[in-house]
Image (tube, grey):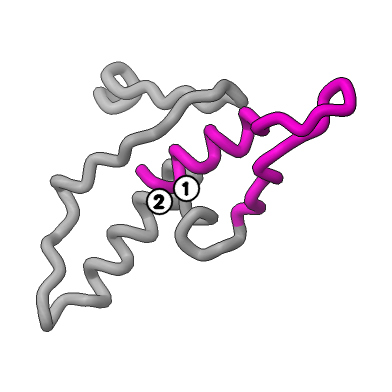
Amino acid sequence: TSPATQSETINVSDSHTLLNVNMTNVTKLNATNFLMWSRQVHALLDGYDLAGYVDGSMVVPSSTVTENQTSVVNPVYLLWKRQDRL
């Protein structure tokens, strides 16, 4: 196995985990490097499955749901909102 396989683990699940993307290794955007910067950012967001938050393809859940004939805050929406802000 390669060293990367031994030291790197990426868990993918349907759990309610928020991802905070570390952008320290992305080239700082300036007046001359937009294409390179854009490719790095898109690759990073695609890798974390977060591109939908930026390009609008992520479906926004309803902010409320009905439980026992009462409208309550949708916990899925709260998770979506927090991840969108991060």
Q: In which quadrant will I find the N terminus?
A: top left
**Residue appearing at x 30%, y 68% in the figure:** 38
Q: In which quadrant will I find the C terminus?
A: top left
> To which quarter of the image does residue 65 belong?
top right
Q: Which residue is mark 1?
A: 50
**Residue appearing at x 44%, y 38% in the figure:** 82
Above or below, 34 against 15 in this view is: below
Above or below, 35 against 50 in this view is: below
Element marked by disc 1: loop
**In the foreground, 22 or 84:** 84
* 40 sits left or right of 76 in the view: left
Is the residue marked by circle 1 packed among few (<14), some (14-19), or many (20+) residues within 10 Å? some
- Place of residue 4 in the rendered image (x, y in percent of width and height, measured from the top left): 28, 27
**In the foreground, 20 or 13:** 20
Q: Which residues are magenta?
A: 58-86
**Residue appearing at x 47%, y 48% in the figure:** 50
Q: Total label count? A: 2
* 3 sits left or right of 73 in the view: left
- Place of residue 3 in the rendered image (x, y in percent of width and height, measured from the top left): 25, 23
Q: Amino acid at mark 2?
A: Leu
Pointer 2 with pointer 1, Cβ within 8 A: yes
Element marked by disc 2: helix
- Place of residue 55 in the rendered image (x, y in percent of width and height, measured from the top left): 51, 64
Of the numbered discs 2 and 1, the one sitting upstream in the chain is 2
Q: Is residue 80 magenta?
A: yes
Which residue lies most toward the bottom here? 32
Is the residue marked by circle 2 packed among few (<14), some (14-19), or many (20+) residues within 10 Å? some
**Residue appearing at x 37%, y 55% in the figure:** 43
Q: Amino acid at mark 1?
A: Leu
Identify the mark at residue 45; answer none if there is no mark. Answer: 2
Q: CA distance from mark 2 to mark 1?
A: 5 Å
- Place of residue 36 in the rendered image (x, y in percent of width and height, measured from the top left): 23, 70
